[in-house]
Amino acid sequence: MSEVRLSTADVIELFEMLQLVNDWISTDPIAQRRLSGFINDSDWAPDTFVADLDRFVFLLGGSNGEYLLRDKDSG
């Protein structure tokens, strides 16, 4: 895989966009249903998408990753 370099401004913009989508999908049940219908995959769930967004935000340096390690049942 080739290396991709992003400017700091681009990383910040990407982080903000991912965080916005993450917040929207994780708090809006209607958005979750619509996204599930759009994806149309029985093995896919909105929480999977939110977890992927969380990982991307962490990889971009937008979080400390603490929420990636917590138990799902503890919230």
Image: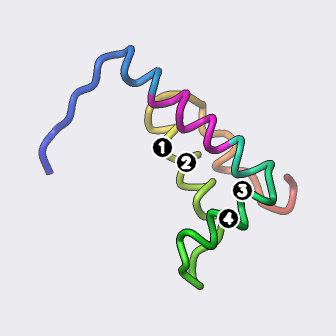
Of the residues under marks 3 and 2, which one precedes in the sequence? Answer: 3
Give the number of the disc on residue 34. Answer: 4
> Nearer the viewer's eye, disc 3 or disc 2?
3
> Nearer the viewer's eye, disc 3 or disc 1?
3
Give the number of the disc on residue 15. Answer: none
User: Which residue sits furthest top?
Assistant: 9
Tell me the CA gap for discs 1 and 4: 22 Å
Give the number of the disc on residue 53. Answer: 2
Q: Residue at x 59, y 30 (%)?
A: 63
Q: Are marks 2 and 1 in contact (CB under 8 Å)?
A: yes
Tell me the CA gap for discs 2 and 4: 17 Å
Of the residues under marks 1 and 4, which one precedes in the sequence? Answer: 4
Tell me the CA gap for discs 3 and 2: 15 Å
Tell me the CA gap for discs 3 and 1: 20 Å
Comparing 28 with 9, the one in front is: 28
Tell me the CA gap for discs 2 and 1: 5 Å
Mark 2 Cα shell of 10 Å, populated few (<14), some (14-19), many (≥20): some
Tell me the CA gap for discs 4 and 3: 5 Å
Q: Residue 12 at what x, y percent from top left?
A: 46, 21
Range covered by the magenta-colored residues: 14-22
Q: Are marks 4 and 3 in contact (CB under 8 Å)?
A: yes
Q: What residue does disc 1 label? A: 56
Of the residues under marks 2 and 4, which one precedes in the sequence? Answer: 4
